[in-house]
Amino acid sequence: MKTLVLHLLPVVAIGIMTCACSAGITVTTLSVENKANPGQTYQGTLTLSNTDSVPRRALIYQTDYAFFSDGSNHYDEPGDMARSNAPWITYSPHQVDVPPQRTSQLTYSVRVPDDSTLTGTYWSILMVEEVEMPEDPPAQLQRRQTEIRQVVRYGIQCVTHVGTAGHGKLNFTDTKLVANEDNRRELQVDVENTGERWMIPSAWLELYDSGGKQVGRFESEKKRIYPGTSVRFRMNLGSTPAGKYKALVVLDNGDQNVFGAKYDLEF
């Protein structure tokens, strides 16, 4: 048996001062999407609001964005990803001071290249980050105090669906039956999109006993899956008693695209 020893560390009294920089800047949406053909251009407007009683400054910049079933998120340089639409986007302003209790407009234009090989979903992020104003007063720190400043960023996903060809394709890459924090069983299903278009499927698990009787249906939240990305669906089995079961996992995109996988579960 392994013995765990609790070590008590000496305590050094250090005060933590959190700056009074509550989130003043907010945005009206975190996702915009449009359909377009090669050679077409479209425009849009985003609204930035300052909910604070003093002026706030926002810095706007671009990044690529990808996420994976292991929980990792990648914010790469704009245009690095094969399906990045960042090079197609121009926007203004790149920095804006928003008066207290007022709004400012961020305009953008997306010009799809006149390239007939383009098809499917392309995307990137417009990042809105609140930064310090020059007149923001410095914090008055006492001895042994440390200041922690809060950085507020909003990633607005800018999505372009080009043409009508291409489709999404979902692959089941890994499945695990685990016990969660409440010691309840949870089926984790990793899924990747190897197609050309995004998919936003509903996911659920149908559980059947050895006699073929359905004993439960367990749902997971909807997830957006871009081409080349992957996600993890979690189905909490609740208080299902121990035993042997047949499991059917269904991913339904709400159209003709429905995917399924069967598993034998024993717990």
Image: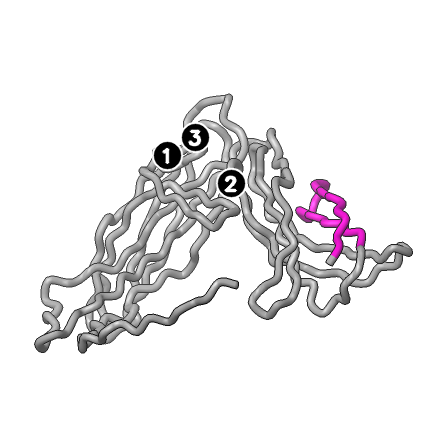
x and y, in percent, of residue 53 in the image: 23, 75
Q: Nearer the viewer, residue 133 or 113?
A: 133
| Disc 2 to disc 1, C-alpha distance | 21 Å
Left-right relation of 187 to 101: right
Of callouts 3 and 1, which one flags the residue occurring earlier in the amino acid sequence? Answer: 3
Mark drawn on residue 111: none
Q: Foreground residue, 243 or 45?
A: 243
Residue 252 showing in the rendered view: yes
Decide: is 127 above or below 138.
above
Q: Callout 2: helix, strand or loop?
A: loop
Q: Circle 1: is it few (<14), some (14-19), or many (20+) Cα within 10 Å?
A: some
Label 3: which secondary element: loop
The answer to whether residue 122 is above or below residue 210 is above
Give the residue type at disc 1. Answer: Trp
**Residue linked to disc 3:** 82
Part of the protein shown in magenta: 245-266
Whether the magenta-drawn stretch holds residue 213 is answered as no
Outermost residue on the front side: it is 1
The quadrant of the image that shows the C terminus is bottom right
Residue 229 shows which numbered tag? 2
- The answer to whether mark 3 and mark 1 are in CB contact below 8 A is no
